[in-house]
Amino acid sequence: MMLGALKSAIVALFLVGAAAPTSVAAQATSQQSMAFESEPLSIISPKGVTHKFSVELALTPPQLEFGLMYRDKMAADHGMLFDFGTSRPVMMWMKNTKLSLDMLFLDQTGIVTHIQENAVPYSEAIISSGGPVAYVIELNAGIVKKLGLAVGDKVTSATISKKSGK
């Protein structure tokens, strides 16, 4: 009985391994088709200046891991909102990410607590949130400087409002 179960497990493991993509290119191609929902998002300065974006939502563990990897371009008013589900220290990196990005780290109420500008494409250097955060927004590099975005700005979107109760 045990031998039969062991043979079945080995065959199943072999079949799963054989069905998996065998090259980095095949993995990248299969992951590029990952679907993300999107929603409008606004960033509001303490002086009341509002900047509007359309962001894709990274909500599930595979989406959070994949993010903007392998993208060749992104519209100037687009980005990605990562929702970590709870407030905690977060570490990001740029592995397999072709685009240089600005990252805004947000607390659970949508307030920008830390900013990393011009993250280097393909870098495996760790980018820390600098403390507990609930969300990260990735935008094209240079947007933070161009629009004057800063720590203390307020971010609103349906996803953030749903969790913060506002």
Image: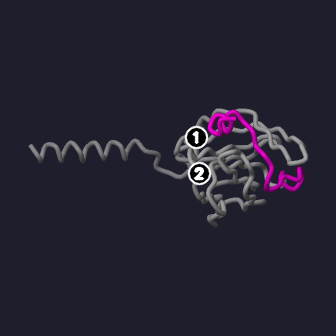
The part of the chain drawn in magenta is 143-166
Asked which secondary structure carries label 1, the reply is loop
Residue at horizontal 64%, vertical 45%?
A: 82
Circle 1 sits on which residue?
A: 59
Residue at horizontal 58%, vertical 40%?
A: 59
Residue 149 position (above or below residue 126): above
Q: Residue furthest left?
A: 1
In this rendering, position of residue 145 left or right of residue 86: right
Residue 39 position (above or below residue 144): above
Residue at horizontal 65%, vertical 39%?
A: 164
In this rendering, position of residue 15 left or right of residue 56: left
In this rendering, position of residue 40 left or right of residue 87: right
Circle 2 sits on which residue?
A: 87
Q: Amino acid at mark 1?
A: Leu
Please state which of residues 30 and 97 is positioned toward the viewer in this rendering.
97
Distance (Cα) linking label 2 and label 1? 14 Å
Residue at horizontal 75%, vertical 52%?
A: 112
Q: In x, y percent, where is residue 35?
A: 60, 35
Neighbor class of circle 1 (other Cα within 10 Å; few <14, some 14-19, many 20+) is some
Neighbor class of circle 2 (other Cα within 10 Å; few <14, some 14-19, many 20+) is some
**Residue 8, picture quadrant:** top left
Q: Are marks 2 and 1 in contact (CB under 8 Å)?
A: no
Q: In x, y percent, where is residue 1?
A: 8, 43
